[in-house]
Image (spheres, grey):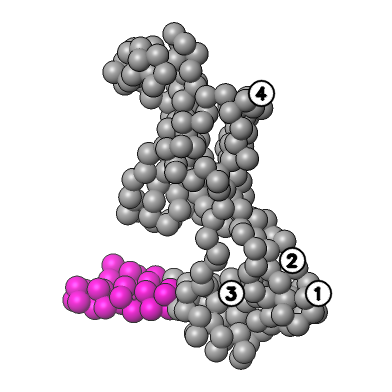
Amino acid sequence: MYNQSEFGNLENYLLEKKSFKKTSCEHTLNTYVFTGEVELKKHRFKKFSLLLINTYDEKALEILSKFFFLLCITIALVTIINFLGNDIADWFYILGIVFSLIPLIISLCIQNVLEYYQDTFCKKCGNKLACEEVGEPIMKETSSFGDYTLTVTRHWKCRYCGNVDTRESSENIFAEQGEMLPAVSLKGIECRKCGGIGTIVETKRPDIKEIGKKRLTRRYYNCTLCDHEDISESEEITFHGTHTG
């Protein structure tokens, strides 16, 4: 856990997060490591997933997903070619595009089913729908002056053979380092320790992650007057498409 004697004035960051017992921050040399608990994984379309998983194996589900995706592209291309090459009504073009979205939605649903299949499949005994998530999943963020990575560790226990499988992945969470603020934007910031104004500098590029529709930005500041280090986070809602890692 976070310890003031070890990590100095990073304490204000954890106090602001109001999760002192669940969040830790380690600072060694030029690297920051943030560790905290996240929610258990939630699967959408669970009943639909159970139906397909009990009917098909993983390979068949992959083929189905690709088939509907290709069908989407085919319908869209045929519609566009006919629209450009023939004098057809606009409603036909719109109808074709709408119909092309149906297999796309089905393909995305099957992708969710595949994820549920892989999460609940026991690699030891080979049973489908066998694993349940146990323990506390942990998100680990590692930020240095040149890189920012994020991993989530989850534990899955088989209800048949009792095997516990620990899995680590990025879970397709978009994570990157952003751009530092221009110096003029920092002039009005007051140091939380000494109260100095115009003494704050940004020490490294900010960390940016997107989870669902939330975009979180973490910035690193330092006071040139008292050498106080400050970490702040801001959150905004995004409406664009989800990034994939």
From the image, give the main secondary structure of the stretch colored magenta.
helix
Q: Are marks 1 and 3 in contact (CB under 8 Å)?
A: no
Residue for point 77% across, 76% down: 162
Which residue was labeled with disc 2? 165
Specify start and end residues of the magenta stretch as a single range.
76-105
Secondary structure state at the residue bearing disc 3 = helix
Q: Quadrant of residue 192?
A: top left
Q: What amino acid is labelled 1 in the image? A: Lys
Which of the two discs, 1 and 2, labels the residue nearer the N terminus?
Answer: 1
User: Is 84 on the left-hand or right-hand side of 217?
Assistant: left
Secondary structure state at the residue bearing disc 2 = strand
- Give the number of the mark in front: 4 or 1: 4
Which of the two discs, 4 and 3, labels the residue nearer the N terminus?
Answer: 4
Which residue was labeled with disc 4? 29
Which residue was labeled with disc 3? 116
Vertical side of 214 occupied by 104: above or below: below
Which residue was labeled with disc 1? 124
Which of the two discs, 3 and 2, labels the residue nearer the N terminus?
Answer: 3
Along the viewing direction, whichever of 114 and 95 lies nearer the viewer: 114
Q: Quadrant of residue 33?
A: top right
Residue for point 43% across, 26% down: 180
Vertical side of 122 occupied by 9: above or below: above
Q: CA distance from mark 4 to mark 2?
A: 33 Å
User: Is 165 on the left-hand or right-hand side of 56?
Assistant: right
